[in-house]
Image (cartoon, helix red, strand yellow):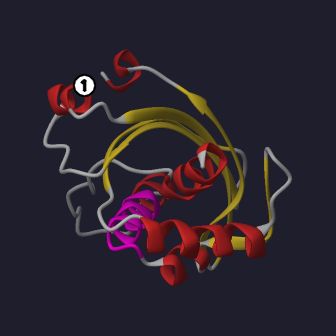
Amino acid sequence: MRKLLGRLLLLLWAGGSLLACSGGPDSPEDEIRNFIASAVEAAERRSSDDLSEMIHESYLDQSGYNKKRVAGMLRLYFLRHKNIHLFTRIGEIELLGENQATARLHVAMAGSVISDIDAVSALRARVYGFELRLVRQDEWLLQHASWKPASLVDLE
């Protein structure tokens, strides 16, 4: 079950709030923040199809799982868990070129609404740190992810 949770969290990589619209085209960093926010919304709606569409065909995670295997695990996880709520903090976004980037973030996950950082502790939410590698092909897609347990202070 812990590995399944890790796979889910990997895809939830999660996101913070959307930036205010500037009227102009989004910067690559804004696009990545919006991508992460969309993944969070899809996860909270328990939409394995929407999340799967956000994964690159050559995806491979730290455990050697590919896109097909992760998609199947998401479907199973969503069948078993009726409520998924996330609290996220995006750390560093680094552009590695025009079409590649990395993002570091922390995610807390619980079965009840996480209204603020104080609720993370009260709900005994699990917190994970993620490092994501993204690639842009018309839109940003998840190409690789690694994660490890984190603590409440990492969300501050």
Between 101 and 17, the one nearer to me in the picture: 17
Q: Which residues are magenta?
A: 34-46
Residue 52: quadrant of the picture: bottom right
Q: Is residue 59 left or right of residue 147?
A: right
Q: Is residue 12 above or below residue 93?
A: below
Residue at image position (55%, 50%) is 5
Vertically, is 83 above or below 6? below
**Is residue 118 toward the left or the right of residue 19 in the image?**
left
- Where in the figure is residue 83, as x and y percent of width and height? 29, 62
* Residue 138 picture quarter: bottom right
Disc 1 residue type (three-letter)? Ser
Q: Position of residue 128 (x, y in %)?
A: 50, 34
| Residue 38: % across, % down | 39, 67
**Residue ID at (45%, 62%):** 31
* Nearer-the-camera pick, 133 or 112: 112
On whether residue 39 falls in the magenta region, the answer is yes
- Dominant SS in magenta: helix
Which residue ends up furthest to the top in the rendered image?
A: 153
Which quadrant, please, contains the C terminus?
A: top left
Q: Residue at x 36, y 16 (%)?
A: 153
Q: Is residue 98 magenta?
A: no
Query: Percent from the top left, x then y, of residue 76?
Result: 57, 72
The residue identified by callout 1 is 121
Mark 1 Cα within 10 Å, few/some/many (few <14, many 20+)?
A: some
